Amino acid sequence: MISWAVAFMIVVPVASALAIWGLRLRTLAGPLALLATIAMLTASAPIAIRVESEGPQSAFRGWVLVDSLSVVILVLIIAVGVCAVLNSVSYIDHDVAGGELTEHDRRRYYALLLVFMATMVTVPVTNNLGVMWVAIEATTVVSVLLVSIYRTGPALEAAWKYLLIGSVGIGLALFGTMMTYYASSAISGENGSALSWTELQRIAAQFDPRVMRLAFIFVVVGYGTKAGLAPMHTWLPDAHSQAPSPVSGLLSGVLLNCAVYAILRFRIIAIGSAGSQFTDHLLIAFGLFSIAIAVPFLVVQHDIKRMLGYHSVEHMGIIVLAIGIGGHVALYAAMLHLVAHSLTKSSLFFAAGSLVQAFHTRSMHRMRGLLRIMPVAGAGLMLGVLALAGLPPFAMFTSEFGLVSGAFASGRGTIGVLGAVFITLAAISLLYHSIEVAYGEPRPGAPVRRLSASTALSVFAPLLLLSWISIAPPSAFVHSIDHAVLVLEGN
Amino acid sequence: MSREFASSTIDNLALGMLLAAIAIVWVRTPGQALLLFAAQSVMLGAAAVSAGLAESSPHILVAGALTLAIKGIAAPVLLWVVLKRIPAGDEIDATLGRRMGVALAIALALVFAQSFDGYPFVAAIGAQRVLPTAVTVVVIGLQLMVTRRQAVSQALGFLVLENGMALAALTATYGMPLGVELGIFLDLFLVVLVIFVYTARMHLIFGSLDTDRLRSLRG
């Protein structure tokens, strides 16, 4: 059953992409893509239920393994994916009508978007670190093409940087994977299972810790490049701002998670071999640096999508910092933050996309009085901003509080306080910029543009989900996060 | 092929790859650099083939054949097509002079040869000098990417880096399991295709391949 569901989640989007491309679909491309992602969501439900009730499920002779950690990542990818396709419908129609994209581009867009979904879904379900690498590199190749879908100079510049920096990063991650394979094949011989992370986790204690430490450095720098950790983050604000906004939502909301997920899997193995002190220090350093470096760029930022991009650098830093701090509380905070960030950031990018299309600019100076002239989009944007700033009652308040208290609990109080200071500065600058946008005096000739129903749904659905898990989290959600934390702790 | 013969062959091929990398830093035109890269890839493929013969392992032979096909032929040909379309600006533009560049590359080679010295790896094939050599090739690739301004040369830097990685993987563990190896080659091929498309588009939009034009996104 699991093997059917997993195969379905990968085959359906690829087949739909081929159909959109091969049958030269026009107006039907959007609805078909939506149908495909909803089908994926349906297929993920039984997997999630099985895993949460019966424990990890394996399929395809051990090549596929889904546990609680995979389920969290997987369901997020697909849920945000459905919203992104929903958001694409009006967005792409608008650009095709305005002549920025052609009918041919529309086909290309939906086909690539679905293949992108398939590559992302492969990451959390494979039990093989090599296959995971191949899938993550494939996400780069596909998403780069989505970033450059507008044939403009800046889009090409962003895509070129993303392709080269991303490929080098991922190359380093391959080197780290290769070293892990080297460490394990010394123990278990050269065969396929020497890269299966369940097997690696089992025999990690026998690895040469020097090799494993070196491997982990390469993995963190390599996949960290893809996750937007500073100082390897320079491509991220470019790519996330130049991509079509629904794609920005996917890049920021869930693709970054895939890279973090890869680091998490390696972390479990590295701890088994070299102990947790080394991995903790490395992750704390990268996490704290990423949060700190985002702050000055956030303060001076006027481009709404670049601002959201830099916030992604900051929030990936928060997640990695919480993981580095370690202990049950901080790890729980990390997982909760990861979920909350996905929902919030994708919704914000979807809302920002409508604003950019309405105002014909990404500059926040030109978007004033939003609540008066575009009340629905304005309300969505402000709700998302409040959530992203970590104000109560939203989940990011809980997770950031958990990060700091976890830091004190594990004797890393100074780091917790330092992190909290930078996080607060980032939140203040976010609120400052957004309050101007929401409440400022509308400029003369400001556009009045209503959101289409599908766009409004794509903006508000993630926020509703977020409010639900923030204010009255269902016990199933709490349990699945708890189980994911148990996986992170190596159980 | 005996293992001893194979390991000394691979040692020599690795040295050849390093010399090719340094020569890429040295030469004046992207066309020459491309030829050197093709030669480097052929040496990499030959190293894989000799490892495959020594171990009589079909999987390593397949990897060697794919290396020859993709890195030795497909990638250089595609980049050659790009260069053919752009008659002017054939000179390599670098932020670091050629002499300084080569000096840096040689210094890197010496540093890695000294400091790496086998630690903590023992190459599977028994070739002694390969691992530090491979790491040096990786770093020279990185140096090319950072110091070159012309798009094809930057892409070439990435491919040189990739060759270094593949050499390290080949000698440390005979590469990855075949299924994973095929995926890696597929990804690499796709990256080369995208590089091909982008360089063509860059020429279309900016009328040149100078990545200094890619400077509008800041802050």
Image (cartoon, rainbow, N blue to C red):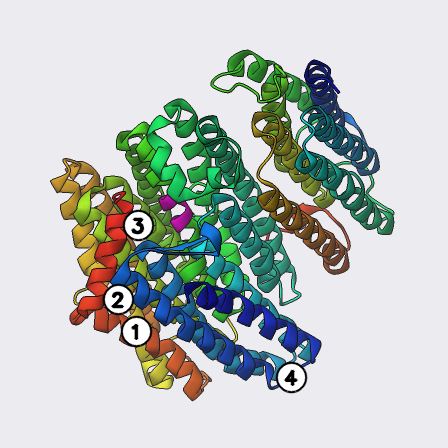
Q: Label 3, label 2: how many angstroms apart (C-alpha)?
A: 16 Å
From what the image shows, is residue B52 above or below residue A409?
Answer: above
Please report, as a chain letter, where disc 4 is located. A
- Label 3: which secondary element: helix
Callout 1: residue from which chain? Answer: A
> Marks 1/3: CA distance?
20 Å
> For residue B140, which quarter of the picture?
top right
Name the residue type under label 1.
Leu
Left or right? Give the position of A289 relative to B36: left
Rendered location of residue A361, percent (x, y): 50, 71
Q: Name the residue under label 2.
A: A387
Question: Is disc 2 placed on a helix, strand or loop?
Answer: helix
Q: Quadrant of the N terminus of chain B?
A: top right
Mark 1 near mark 2, Cβ–Cβ under 8 Å?
yes
**Front disc: 1 or 2:** 1
Q: Which of marks 1 and 2 is nearer the N terminus?
A: 2
Per the model, the C-alpha gap separating discs 4 and 1 is 31 Å
Q: Distance between the residues labelled 4 and 2?
A: 37 Å
In this figure, which residue is indicated by the disc labeled 4?
A: A26
Please state which amino acid type lies under the numbered disc 4. Arg
The residue segment tinted magenta is A260-265
Do the residues at pointers 1 and 2 share their chain? yes
SS type, badge 1 = helix
Q: How many marks?
A: 4
Q: Is residue B110 magenta?
A: no
Q: Position of residue A123 (x, y in %)?
A: 46, 54
**Amino acid carrying mark 2 in the image:** Ala
User: Dot 4: what SS?
Assistant: loop
Residue A122, x across and y down, in percent:
49, 58
Residue A264 falls within the magenta-colored stretch: yes
Badge 3 is on which residue?
Answer: A319
Task: Provide the chain ID for the residue under circle 3.
Answer: A
